[in-house]
Image (cartoon, rainbow, N blue to C red):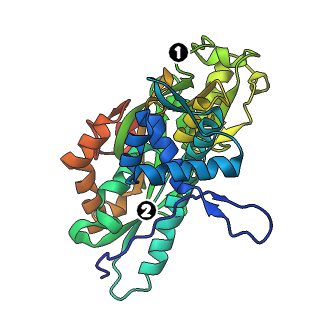
Amino acid sequence: MSDGAFRIALRPGWWLTQGSGDDGVPLQEVLALLSAIDAVGHIAGACRACGLSYRHGWGVLRRFETVFGTPLLITRRRQGTELSPFAQRLLWANRRIEARLMPMLDSLASELQEDLERLLPETGPHLRLHASHGFAVEALMQHISAPARLSEGGAALELRYRTAAEALASLDGGECDLAGFQVPQGDFEAAMLRHYAQWLHPSEHLLIHLAVRNTGLFVTAGNPKNIHGIADLARPDVRFVNRQIGSSTRHLIELMLRRLKIPVARVHGYENSEFTHMAVAAHIASGMADAGIGVETAAHRFGLDFIPLARERYFFAIRKSALEQPAMQALLAIMRGTDYKGYVGQLTGYDASETGRIQTLQEAFG
């Protein structure tokens, strides 16, 4: 079996070109420096955080101020240094791009990793996980030892980010071993289960409980538009950013609007969508929308206010025949371990008390 000597990672990068034939200049260094200045409030500390000399840091800033033709910093005596409006917009654009692209790139990297490892001698079996992007799923990949090895079972975990419906359809069609999906507790549980019913079969499938999480509206810090619930999305002064077509979060919003008899056409920005909770949060934090929907963790990380709408249980569906496979048992051991459960439990809005619990559909939903 491969000894895990390499791991594939893909990262987005900005390149600035000036005219045809120009290979371009990478912006990674100046973006990292601007982010550090935004965090610590002065150039000297930002340079230390980035491992740069003070002179080199200033040189980077001056170079790109010349290229852009506008200041990147505003320095006030005795008040430290802050980013100019242009630099703030540049930094927020980078955060939005990273939030939007990182799950997609992680999924592609996992696919490439598996394609290459299958060509290596003595490559072991692998589990295929299809799931919507979420913080507990992301953490699971991080807690499996690089490059995605499942302890002594020797199997790799191959991840594809999909909507919940796509993931369950893949499981039903034999294209994956685990399918991630979420179900809101309470009033909308039955409607969501009907949405999934064509792919979930009590005689064939079991559920692995991953976590319970808070889902709700993200609004700008301080809630200047006084948004308090779904009904406010129909106001003409509220700009909304949605999740992508086919996502369970978008379906939940549709169910909530339908209960209030609000046509989606009345929601300004309903067709504007992002693919991850973090991308929704970044969209709002950068001033491009007033409200969006996602899990509380993303709102917390971007300093947004959060208005709870639902508690959701997140599960992995598996085939009953797969439960006793060594690779699946190794994965369960990681999920039930104190390191993983402790990490998920400290995520804002997450409850990991039942992580790793096996349930039938009847036990889970009655």
Q: Residues within 10 Å of mark 2 (few under 14, many from 20)?
A: many
Residue 202 picture location, percent across and down: 43, 48
Which is nearer the eye, 327 or 352? 352
Q: Is residue 103 something one can see in this rendering?
A: no
In the orientation shown, which residue stands out farthest toward the bottom?
121
Secondary structure at badge 1 equals loop
Single out the mark in the foreground, 1 or 2.
Answer: 1
Q: How far apart are labels 1 and 2 at the CA level?
A: 43 Å
Q: Residues within 10 Å of mark 1 (few under 14, many from 20)?
A: few
Left or right, 299 with reference to 355: right
Residue 177 image label? 2
Residue occupying the point 54% across, 56% down: 28
Which is nearer the eye, 319 or 25? 25
Residue 127 picture location, percent across and down: 39, 66
Secondary structure at badge 2 equals loop
| Above or below: residue 340 compared with residue 301 | below
| Above or below: residue 36 compared with residue 230 | below
The amino acid type, in three-letter code, at marker 2 is Asp
User: Which corner quadrant of the image does residue 124 belong to?
Assistant: bottom left
Residue occupying the point 71% across, 61% down: 17
Which residue is identified by label 1? 222
Contact, mark 1 vs mark 2 (Cβ under 8 Å): no
Residue 265 picture location, percent across and down: 79, 26
Which is nearer the eye, 105 or 154? 105
User: Which corner quadrant of the image does residue 6 belong to?
Assistant: bottom left
